[in-house]
Image (cartoon, rainbow, N blue to C red):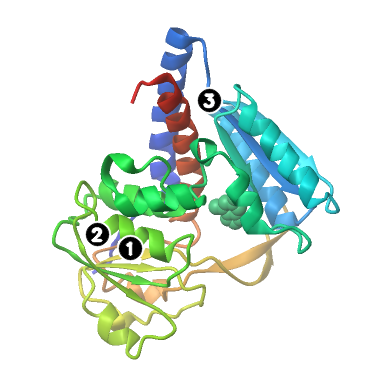
Amino acid sequence: MSAKLILGTEIREEILEEITAEVSQIKAKYGKVPGLVTILVGENPASISYVTLKIQTAHRVGFHEVQDSQPIDISEEDLLALIAKYNKDDSINGILVQLPLPKHIDEKKVLNAIDPDKDVDGFHPVNVGRLMIGGDEVKFPPCTPAGIQEMIIRAGVKTSGAEVVVVGRSNIVGKPIANMMLQKGKGANATVTIVHTGTKDLAFHCKRADILIVAAGVPDLVKPEWIKPGACVIDVGVNRVGEKISEKTGKKIAILKGDVDFEAAKEIAGSITPVPGGVGPMTITMLMLNTLKSLKFKLGIN
Ligand code: GUN
């Protein structure tokens, strides 16, 4: 049997259309649109391409968008002053500092300087705390976990009472998605296990999973025999395993592989996300949703 594919590329289009419609309604009624600033330090090619896509998407859904590029040698003090400026700017509802930052800048200090009510990445400790409490307290769930949960909901996968196993304990994916799946409510209420590099028997835990979420950063870590027949498999891995020439553009592009042996796993799973085209497109989509939410919180229309 071949698993149903859960395509982030398709779900993204549905959500972006919903956002565009809501932005135009808010604009008509309140005369305001969500504002997003992305701050990029230096010229890391991967960061440039992520930020460009974020800004293009913000433009597409009708946001006010600002791309603020800063030189690699900007001082920490100047970067903090820039964030303070956007914290005060009424036209900006979301501030995103693209990571990683150069070594001379303290990343934690920078993320903590963003107003938690404009922290659309959901990385500020206040928002991490809000996520832990759950329910109405949550303002900005981090984008990749929020995208994963949305895919699970829209694919119609039952979560209440399900055994969810999360592979990986990062602050950006593993810890927050585990936390979100165990809360009461829609797309959650699951029994959650987190496994990591200290776990004795990875296979044992993965085999029990009704929903297996893999964010380890190790290509083909999850073997087909670790997958329970009919399970939902969410592969968050984006591993660059080589380069090829793009048929579309004729340019060199990375060959990407997930953390799950996709070809074999799709014969066992009930549903599965591919790499690329699965979780990846959802991250930027949820950033747009968080930025829209930020304006709605400000206008008191949630
Ligand atoms: N760098 C890679 N992923 C991300 C992300 O989700 N947010 C930010 N700010 N930087 C990143």
Q: Which mark is residue 194?
A: none
Rendered image quadrant of residue 241: bottom right
Q: Which residue is mark 2?
A: 182
Q: Which mark is residue 178?
A: 1
Q: Nearer the viewer, residue 14 or 246?
A: 14
Q: Quadrant of the C terminus?
A: top left
Find residue 181 and report its horizontal and vertical position in percent.
27, 58
Question: Does residue 151 sit above or below 25 in this rendering?
Answer: below
Task: Specify whether 144 is left or right of 224.
Answer: right
* Residue at the far bottom in the pictured view: 200
Find residue 13 and report its horizontal and vertical position in percent.
43, 37
- C-alpha distance separating marks 2 and 3: 31 Å
Task: Name the amino acid type tagged 1.
Answer: Ala
Q: Within 10 angstroms of label 2, few (less than 14), some, or many (20 or more) residues?
A: many
Is disc 1 placed on a helix, strand or loop?
A: helix
Q: Quadrant of the N terminus?
A: bottom left
Task: Look at the numbered discs 1 and 2 and tell me whether their residues touch, using CB distance below 8 Å.
Answer: yes
Query: Can residue 99 be seen?
Result: no
Task: Name the amino acid type tagged 3.
Answer: Pro
Q: Which residue is mark 3?
A: 34
Rendered image quadrant of residue 45: bottom right
Task: Name the amino acid type tagged 2.
Answer: Leu
Question: Does residue 21 sit above or below 237 in this rendering?
Answer: above
* Residue at the far left in the pictured view: 161
Task: Look at the numbered discs 2 and 3 and tell me whether their residues touch, using CB distance below 8 Å.
Answer: no
Q: Earlier in the sequence, mark 2 or mark 3?
A: 3
Q: Nearer the viewer, residue 219 or 85?
A: 85
Residue at position x 23%, y 72% in the image: 209
Residue at position x 45%, y 53% in the image: 144
- C-alpha distance separating marks 1 and 2: 6 Å
